[in-house]
Amino acid sequence: MKTRKIVLLAGIAALLCVYILQVIGAHRSPVKEFTLSAEPDAITIESASNGAIQLNKIGEKWLVNNQLAEENQMYMLTNAVKNVKTLGVISRSNAEADLQRYGLDDMTKITVTIAKEGKTLRTLVIGKSATNADQTYLRVDGGSETLIASGDLHGQFNVKAEDLVAPPEEEKPAEESAPAAEDVSTQA
């Protein structure tokens, strides 16, 4: 009888351990957020199809290859890199076939380097959009894990420099301001 009680108590203890491990494991979420620790002042976007684009912040304005950048575009790009939300790990393989499958090969990938005062804050290697167009495959900071991120990062960063340049401001024609000056002089 004594041996039977020991076996039953050992079985109960083993089941209790399994239960505790399952409860702990259930609370771990695969969702991870990569948040920048500082406001970036430089972003480099490199791809085989669009070449290298250098974005620099001077004061409150962003410049694209030394031309004034369009504010709305820069707002979208900087917000996209400030907080990247990943939904889980897709692969841990560096095999060429897997890199091509997720659009992380040299011909398809988009490399985004975010910096502040010359120091790299984060590097994103963006692959193609997932089957759900609002998700993208990517790698963060040189890691070997292929993650799936929330948002269409590929669509946002697959841009050409000329797409980011602000349109030139049109000057008001001299004719519009001239009649107002004449009206004031005739009334005097």
Image (cartoon, rainbow, N blue to C red):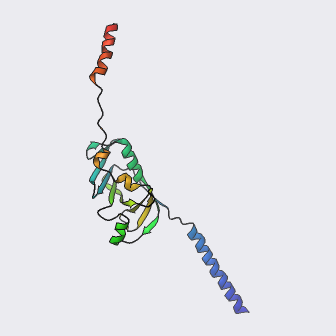
Could you say which is closer to the camera, residue 175 or residue 70?
Answer: 175
Task: Give the side of residue 5 with respect to residue 40, left or right.
Answer: right
Q: Tell which residue pokes out farthest to the top in this image.
A: 188
**Residue at x 35%, y 68% (from the top left corner):** 99
**Residue at x 29% of width, y 18% of height:** 178
Q: Residue at x 37, y 45 (%)?
A: 73
Image quadrant containing the N terminus: bottom right
Looking at the image, the residue that sits furthest to the right is 1
Residue furthest front as drawn: 131
For the residue pair 69 and 116, the one nearer the viewer reads as 69
Residue 108: x %, y % from top left: 32, 61
Q: Give the quadrant of residue 59.
A: top left
Q: Quadrant of residue 100?
A: bottom left
User: Where on the picture, by quarter, is residue 89?
Assistant: bottom left
Q: Is residue 59 above or below residue 24?
A: above
Does 59 sit above or below residue 142? Answer: above
- In the foreground, 131 or 54: 131
User: Image quadrant for the C terminus?
Assistant: top left
What count of labels does the image hold? Answer: 0
Q: Position of residue 122 (x, y in %)?
A: 37, 58
Residue 8 x, y percent position in the rendering: 69, 86
Please name the residue shown 59% across and 73% down the image.
22
